[in-house]
């Protein structure tokens, strides 16, 4: 998939995240989808379970005023004709007036006859930045 196509795909993903819409966000995922973060692995075998797993996180970000998370840059590494590693840089813009910050996640994107879809995410940078700035964020869950 070419870089303009990847940018368009991640713009749609960004819109879903900013809207706190797990169904729209998960529509970008393959089945299964795996998320890796700070040594924790979450396997979501299908879209139904991915929505159920993701919506509480999106709701938490929204309640905390952290739902605005935009893609400011992206690069890709081609692995094969049908698979790329995507390296989006996100900027999280807090509603509480604290400074915005950027972080890079890594996604595995399959692109074939079924269309583009994410098979995994590595979000160590996202989580470590959230915990550094909002140490009690996940204690309310």
Image (tube, rainbow, N blue to C red):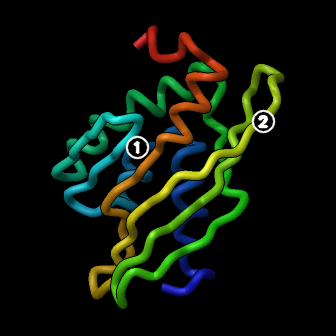
Please tell me which residue is depicted at 66% across the width and 24% down the height of the picture. 65
Mark 2 to mark 1: distance in Å? 23 Å
Q: Position of residue 48 (x, y in %)?
A: 21, 46
Q: Residue at x 66, y 56 (%)?
A: 71
The residue located at (28%, 63%) in the rendering is: 30
Q: Nearer the viewer, mark 2 or mark 1?
A: 2
What label does residue 38 carry, if any?
A: none
Q: Is residue 43 left or right of residue 36?
A: left
Residue for point 39% across, 27% down = 56
Q: Earlier in the sequence, mark 2 or mark 1?
A: 1
> Disc 2 marks which residue?
100
* x and y, in percent, of residue 63 in the image: 57, 20
x%, y% of residue 116?
Answer: 38, 75
The one nearer the camera, 121 or 48, is 121
Residue position marked by numbered label 1 in the rendering: 22
Residue 19: quarter of image: top right
Give the vertical position of 128 relative to 68 (above or below). Answer: above
């Amino acid at each position: 998939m070419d870089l303009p196509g990847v940018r368009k795909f991640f713009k749609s993903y960004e819109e879903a995240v900013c809207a706190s819409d797990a169904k729209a966000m998960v529509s970008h995922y393959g089945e299964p989808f795996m998320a890796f973060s700070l040594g924790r692995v979450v396997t979501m075998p299908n879209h139904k379970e991915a929505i159920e797993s993701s919506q509480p996180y999106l709701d938490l970000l929204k309640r905390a005023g952290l739902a605005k998370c935009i893609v400011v840059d992206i690069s890709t590494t081609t692995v094969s004709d049908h698979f790329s590693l995507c390296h989006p840089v996100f900027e999280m813009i807090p509603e509480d007036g604290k400074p915005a910050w950027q972080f890079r996640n890594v996604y595995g994107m399959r692109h074939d006859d079924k269309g583009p879809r994410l098979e995994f995410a590595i979000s160590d940078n996202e989580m470590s930045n959230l915990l550094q700035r909002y140490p009690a964020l996940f204690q309310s869950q």
